[in-house]
Amino acid sequence: MVYYLQRECNTSMEISSDAIVEFDTELALSAPEDFVYHPDGSIDILNPGTYNVFFQITSMGGQSTVGQSYMLKRRDYQSAGWAPVAGTSNHTKVSQTVGFATVVVEQDEIDTHEKATIALFHMADDSVKLTMFAPQAGILIFGHNYNLLDEMDARITNIQNQITQIQNDITVSEVTTIDSLEPTLRGLSMSVLNIGQQYNFWGSGKFSSNATLNNGTTYWIVRNTRADFYPPLAHYVGDPTVAIAALMMTNGNVYTIPVVVDHQGIRFTPSTQITGITQNCTFNYTLLLFLAPHS
């Protein structure tokens, strides 16, 4: 976040010793909630940050024996007075005095006092008269809140991470087909396509030889202890998911068999013996799972 204030003095005024320089004309202001200028010349800074203050004053003459000397001061809340921020700039006779200072405003000060107040004081031993040519003086305050920049950077990084996550979630994979290594199920396969972390499984392939499925025997289409295991299934958590498979016989008969899925793999256990399975019989099922890496 950037804050700025620029003001001028357009009056040929006399400035007494230890008086605040007044800047009666506003030239630029980032926002009313960033600074408050008071008629006595003091300025309230309303946001934490690091502020660079630049000033120039041109005098015509005066009673001071040491020329003109200026110092930026900051309100001291403990003593109810003013404390120096920067050193002085001096000159003799007629000339222009310029100077600058850096003011760091912490969040604690804003939280406690709602502001940090600064003012430019004339520090010579007597009064000086500003020139008749306008502008007689000017001040520019330019500040950044680097903490907010860090927060914005963190937010941008978070948004980029979310965009990457969304991109990952909408990326459609190629179809992966895994042949079952279960001896009885030779020829059957499991196919899968994922869109991000959403996985679509379906049964594919056909029996490559005659087979019998025994009552109460568990047959693993893919299993985590075998080379045919599909790694994303390791991310499965919770109770097993049950889908219904259709065993399509070549004679037109259809057997429906529950298929169980969890982190161990995909399996089924017939509740009755099924004979007469020949080549080209199919075993079809569909599953939709959300599989995300464990955090």
Image (tube, rainbow, N blue to C red):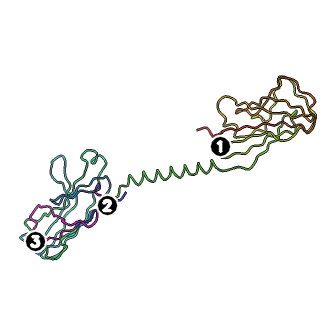
Give the label on residue 197, or none: 1
Q: Residues within 10 Å of mark 1 (few under 14, many from 20)?
A: some
Q: Is residue 13 magenta?
A: yes
Q: Indicate the secondary structure of the residue bearing disc 3.
A: strand
Element at label 1: loop
Seen at 48% across and 53% down, the residue is 156
Give the residue at x 30% y 50%.
106
Q: Earlier in the sequence, mark 2 or mark 1?
A: 2
Q: Nearer the viewer, residue 193 or 84?
A: 193
Q: Residue furthest left?
A: 63
Give the Cα separation between the discs numbered 2 and 1: 47 Å
Q: Are marks 3 and 2 in contact (CB under 8 Å)?
A: no
Q: For the magenta stretch, what is the residue range?
A: 8-32
Q: Which mark is residue 187?
A: none
Q: Which quadrant would residue 15 be assigned to in this image?
A: bottom left
User: Label 3, on which residue?
Assistant: 129
Q: Amino acid at mark 2?
A: Ser
Percent of width and height locating residue 30: 31, 61
Give the labeled residue for mark 2.
30
Vertical position of residue 226 compared to residue 214: above or below: below
* Position above or below: 74 against 238: below
Q: Position of residue 130 (x, y in %)?
A: 13, 72
Q: Nearer the viewer, residue 5 or 124?
A: 5
